[in-house]
Amino acid sequence: MIEPAAKHAAWSKRLVAAFLLSLLPVWLTGCGGVRQEVNLEGLLEQLGDPLLPARLDVPAAYMASSFDPTGGNEDYNQFVRPGPPGWVVLADLRGPGYVSRFWMTGAFSDGYRLRFYFDDEPEPRIDTTLGAFCGDEAPFLPPLAAWENLAWWSYLPLPYARRLVVMGEAPREGERLYVQINHSERLHNVRVETFPWQAERSHRAAIERARQRLAARPEIDADAQRFEARLEVEAGQSAEVVLPPGPAVVRRLELWPDPEEARSAIEREQWLRELVVRVFYEDGVASIEAPFGDFFGQPWFPAGFESLAFGGASGRFDMHLPMPYRRHARVEVRNDGQTRATLALRAWVEELPSFDALGYLHAEWRSSGPAMTQAPHDVIVWEGAGKLAALQAAVWTEEESWNLLEGDERLWIDGLPPELVWHGTGLEDYFNGGWYYQRVLTRPTHGVTGRAPYRTSQYRVHLLDAPAWAQRFRMEWERGPYDVMDGMMETLAFVYAPEPRAVTPIPPDAGARRAGGLLENETIMMDLLGLEQLGDLIGAQQRVRAFLDRFPAHPEAALLRLRDIAYTEQLEGFSVARPLYEEFLSGVRDDRARDQARLLLGFHEREDAGLLTVYSNTPATVYLNGMPVGLGGNAAAALHFPLQVPAGRNVLAVSAPDRARPAWVLVALRTREGIVVSDPDWRWLAAPADDAWKRADFDASGWLRVGGPGVAGPPEEPYRALRADAMVDQASRATGIWPRDQVADPNKTFALRTMFEREGE
């Protein structure tokens, strides 16, 4: 922990930096453009403004965090100072200002307490728990706040007129608290109305509007002009589309491969890196230059999702960040591959009554690899004014370690040292995750579109929490702790600037941009489970086909081909898939593939049929209404069992001996009506006295809820790969669970169970 005197000195310097940065909105907008009053309702309205990312007249955001000031990797329990007995000060912010983002991980439970003292009041206006503040209680509700991917976060703005002191409970033994608080403070010539005591009641309508706007796909104004074009891009050539004259803003840009042009799944995957998107404003140089996939948040393979920045579905790629221009704009696609690419383009363009306070969207892609070990990755170096609106990052290593994600981001704003304005605590922390993420997920402001050992793809959109600068900016990422990891880092930074300018060009060597290695031949199941977690079965089917094109002799190719048929069943129905299953079964020689094909066909022979998946690293017996129906215990493979599920009330239960952590049991039971999965709502008891707990008529209301987030798999460390299988949407829907906070005892047996109803006669 930093000594109080040293910490106070650092914060004195920070106050000077804060004052200098507070002048930024004045520089960007002129005195007449400064917002004269800030309050909760106004900040909530800004969150829903589709042009907010492009606005240059908002205050700069910077960050207080628990980073290790010695330069080491102990980015936890580094507090401003001790508080009252049992408390520590997480941040002491000088107003007028507002907090735009709160993030924390490392607390033992969501019962960890927080207090927010506004304007030197003797009592906290907010006195709550971490769980309530991050998703469990109004007004801090999703998608403004949540607990997921092993971290707590909130984007509900907290304005303060003079001062805000944030306190948390002092950490208990072994508790490591990582904290980040983004804020804009010491605003010049601005009156701020402090966060109201009864915010949930007085601002309920504004909060609900902000929640609904963030949760939905960005809307397009009815007056927007829809512009369509077709691009035929020969190998080694470019094709462009000129957009309607300005002043205007592109509210949404869509590109997708022509469905009438037959291409293999692997070719479509390769296009993500072989094609380059370039955008030119005002007949100038390229201000956007990015690999096609990275530009849409999908650097390695297509993934269906939506965010405030980008996304897509069913082969369509969407860009949602606004692209204003004064007079002219054109979009170019360059083909650095070996085959022709035919694309359809659709853009929604709105007229702008005024370009004041808006910036031009720029995108700069940078890549650095093993040759850069001992040096950080430069995300962006920028001369002149601007604002960081979003960041897409793809990182991977073959060192069989997640340590590449341990690197901190550091931001230099107008030459000020990062420890005064923005110094992070880890790569996944910046993207609102923790502990190397739990699973793939996508949200409006951040997301993880790919996670497999040892590679991740992630994005973050800055709204009220955007770094902004008047003269110069630099952002870098440590290559793991002390810059020692031998891995690849690729970032695409989206920046708004007052005038268009050139970005770093991308050399036309597509081979250098192809993701190599990545342990792909061992971790394909992680990719498929992740796409299923996003609800993108079409993407998962295309991914397995591209993989089989690339690795036709893979040892588990037969099971992956069977999984391809299972995707067809989910997407087009069993009547379409049945002859495919039968044809597969008649020719397959792989015993596991044959057995699973029979299971999938047999599932449709009875109305009461069930298909059970069990994945665990401890010997586990699964019971349905007291009868044993399946066994687990293979940490490298999920096991599958057929059964019959009677109509009415049922109990699904597991009995398993304890083992050293990490321990888990994952269960998924598919029926004709739906699926029952293990999750934190299951109940547990240690060493039950008899077998009555396995029956449906047993009262388990007094049992403890499993709780917690579940494990990070499958597979969970230290296992790298999960064996292929054909059971679509089963392991991906379930969560690996285990009783929490228990001392491992191999002589102890745990009982876990859940109730469910099945319709039928």
Image (cartoon, rainbow, N blue to C red):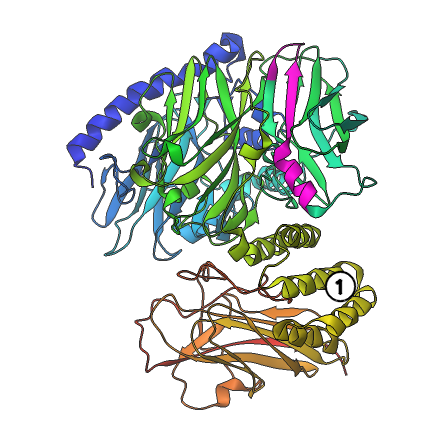
Q: Is residue 304 left or right of residue 191?
A: right
User: 223 or 499: nearer the eye?
Assistant: 499
Q: Element at badge 1?
A: helix
Residue lying at 47% horizontally and 42% vertically, measured from the top left: 154
Quarter of the rendering containing residue 172:
bottom left
User: 19 or 675: nearer the eye?
Assistant: 675
| The stretch drawn in magenta includes residue 36 | no
Q: Is residue 543 left or right of residue 663?
A: right
179 up-or-down from 364: above or below: below
- Residues shaded magenta: 266-286
2 up-or-down from 135: above or below: above
Please state which amino acid type lies under the numbered disc 1.
Answer: Glu
| The stretch drawn in magenta includes residue 279 | yes
Measuring from the top left, give residue 266's x and y in whole percent.
67, 45
Q: Is residue 55 left or right of residue 328?
A: left
Residue 155 makes an appearance in the image: no
User: 568 or 221: nearer the eye?
Assistant: 568
Measuring from the top left, give residue 657's x and y in whole percent.
39, 80
Residue lying at 71% horizontally and 64% vertically, measured from the top left: 566
Measuring from the top left, give residue 754's x and y in whole percent.
54, 75
Quadrant where the image shows the C terminus: bottom right
User: 126 or 108: nearer the eye?
Assistant: 108
Report the residue marked by disc 1.
569
Quarter of the rendering containing residue 126:
top left
